[in-house]
Image (spheres, grey):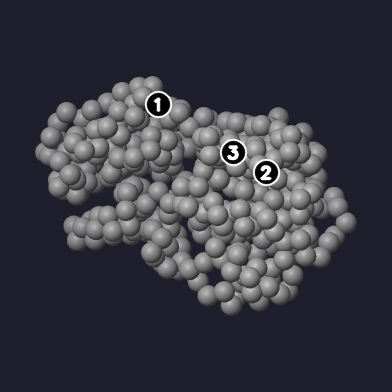
Amino acid sequence: MTFKDLKLSEPLLRALETIGYQTPTPIQQQAIIPIIDGRDIFGCAQTGTGKTGAFLLPLLERMQQQEPKKGVTTLILAPTRELAIQISDNLSAYAENLNISHTTIFGGVSQFHQVKRLQKGVNIIIATPGRLLDLIEQRFIRLDKVEHFVLDEADRMLDMGFIHDVKKVIALLPKKRQTLFFSATASAPIMQLANSLLTNPVQVSVTPVSSAAVSVEQSLYYVKKENKRMLLNHVLTSSDIDHALVFTRTKKGADRVAKDLNKNGISCEAIHGNKSQGARERALQGFKERKIRVLVATDIASRGIDVEKLSHVINFEIPEQAETYVHRIGRTGRAGQSGKALSFCAQEEVKYMKDINKLIKKNITVVEKHPFVH
């Protein structure tokens, strides 16, 4: 199947050719035509499956088929600034040959330039919930003409405590609209929210969260909590790891790990919610360009991080939710590449590791010999 088979018109096909996209991913094959046809969607898909293209391409197709309208007709809600920016970058590439305007709204920076852009008039807003509600309250944004609403990474919205803000936004939307709902998991709260928003939706699902990528080689290190930073330094200095994304559970933990690695001569940056937007973007860009060898991130900040040919993911701390482990290691081994995932497990984290083994239906290979074996 090609993108031409999915009812996309010439301007979009030209843009896809320019950026080198030739074959639609499974979720794009399932979602694009129903969205063009105006259907609501419930999509269960992880980051890295082509989900963003699955909703942006058909929405752009629908918008260009309609009479040009003033005002905001499409709203895309995302949980983090990084993801909002990533969606915006994709949108700019896809809409290169279209007369459709968009802007990105998020907190952590001055609202001045965001407001100026809004005052010029835009068709699509990509936003995080908090700043969106702020600008609505200040009467810079109206949602009464929205025809297409996308809720992306709904599970992360719930995890981050955004559910009340999301419900406030939904209450301001017209009752008659097309709604596209995407989540990496289908828990009871997620299904309850989806059922309240969607009308006779088409269900699309790829790569269930329980399946860790087969292209990722996984290994487990048992280690005392206080020895983890020494183990990380050992692993990075005694192996051929040239590019690694390291996950910690907390912002303070990310800063401590980054400081320790830099002290030991390993170029490293931390990325989390307390960092300014500029600092986060510089760190991510440096990592993508391989000027920075190691990026330390919290789970929330990592949404939207998409790095080509990332060779290693290291779980400095084991996540409490087994599904989060699958999301983390899915950052490597993408697009036919191989990857490696290393996990450092302290005694108090063994219970989390058992949940992970149960979810992925396999026991991860234990590294028996290392200097800090516990």
Q: At x 45% / y 68%, what residue is drawn?
A: 278
For residue 197, the mark is 2
Q: Is residue 309 left or right of residue 33?
A: left
What residue would you read off at disc 3?
A: 192
Q: Which residue is mark 1?
A: 360
Q: Residues within 10 Å of mark 2 (few under 14, many from 20)?
A: some
Q: CA distance from mark 1 to mark 2?
A: 31 Å
- Find residue 313 and report its horizontal and vertical position in percent: 35, 42
Q: Position of residue 202 (x, y in %)?
A: 71, 33
Q: Nearer the viewer, residue 154 or 243?
A: 154
**Badge 2 or badge 3: first in the primary sequence:** 3
Q: Nearer the viewer, residue 69 or 7?
A: 69
Which residue lies at the image location 41% right of the left edge and 39% below the top edge? 324
Q: Secondary structure at mark 1?
A: helix
User: Could one spot residue 212 in this view of the protein?
Assistant: yes
Res 215 → quadrant: top left
Of the two numbered discs 3 and 1 in the rendering, the one whose residue sits closer to the viewer: 3
